[in-house]
Image: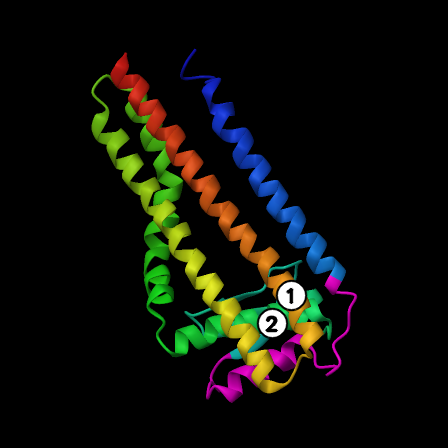
Amino acid sequence: MFYYFDPLYLVFAIPAFLISLIAQMRVQMVFSKYSRVRTFSGLTGAEVAKNILWSNGIYDVRVEYVPGLLTDHYDPRFRVLRLSQGVFDSNSVAAVGVAAHEAGHAIQHYQKYPWLALRTAMVPVVNIGSNLAFPLILIGLLLKNGDIFINLGILLFSLAVVFTLITLPVELNASKRAVEALKVSGVILPDEEIAVKKVLGAAAMTYVAAVSVAILQLLYYLSLVQRRRDD
């Protein structure tokens, strides 16, 4: 029965679910609130992103529209900055903050920010490892001499945890660059700066939540291994 349903799983899963849910609700509430507040400059998210890029000497990054809600991201592989529906053509405080944040990632890439370079290099390994980690651990638990599978699964998932830890300073640094770029360019007023920081702060909490969830999941996997050894 231990392998089919583990009551201890709920001890780790419920806090992880609540942390993730609260962070997502927070960012959506804050984004929704400040999406209704227009900036004095009247510039759209796309215009702000382009202005920040150009003012930093970056002319080879395209700014494109991407469907979805808060699907904004910078793709360093193709040097494309993609902004979602509520950001690309919106002149709200929330849109300007998110667009500037993604432009901050492009600046990191242009300036060879080491944490971004490390995160980008880890992406292929983490994508594979995060999918294989639990199947390997499960196989190891089912086999009498399956320690090699368990250890490999733990190692692969540990890399995913490290990835989330590395992501946190990358995101915080991009937000810091965003606020500074908006201030220097005069795109936002002092009261709008406060609102932008609230939007980016709420977004940062989703990455803190991701770290917490990943650590809780790793602790659960380690508990499985420890109980197997105790048996």
Highlighted magenta segment, given as a residue range: 34-61
Asked whether residue 114 is in view, the answer is yes
- Picture quadrant of residue 189: bottom right
Residue at 59 percent of width and 36 percent of height? 18
Instruction: Please state the total of marks drawn on the protein image.
Output: 2
**Can you give x and y, in whole percent of width and height, for residue 168 in the image?**
44, 56
Residue tagged 1? 84
Q: Amino acid at mark 2?
A: Ala
- Picture quadrant of residue 131: top left
**Can you give x and y, in whole percent of width and height, for residue 152 in the image?**
25, 36
Q: Is residue 110 above or below residue 176?
A: below
Q: Is residue 192 above or below residue 54?
A: above
Q: Quadrant of the C terminus?
A: top left
Disc 1 on helix, strand or loop?
loop
Asked whether residue 65 is in view, the answer is no
Q: Quadrant of the N terminus?
A: top left
**Mark closer to the chain start, 2 or 1:** 1
**Can you give x and y, in whole percent of width and height, for residue 141 in the image?**
31, 21
Residue tagged 2? 99
Please give left or right for residue 37 compared with residue 17 in the image: right
Residue at 71 percent of width and 53 percent of height? 29
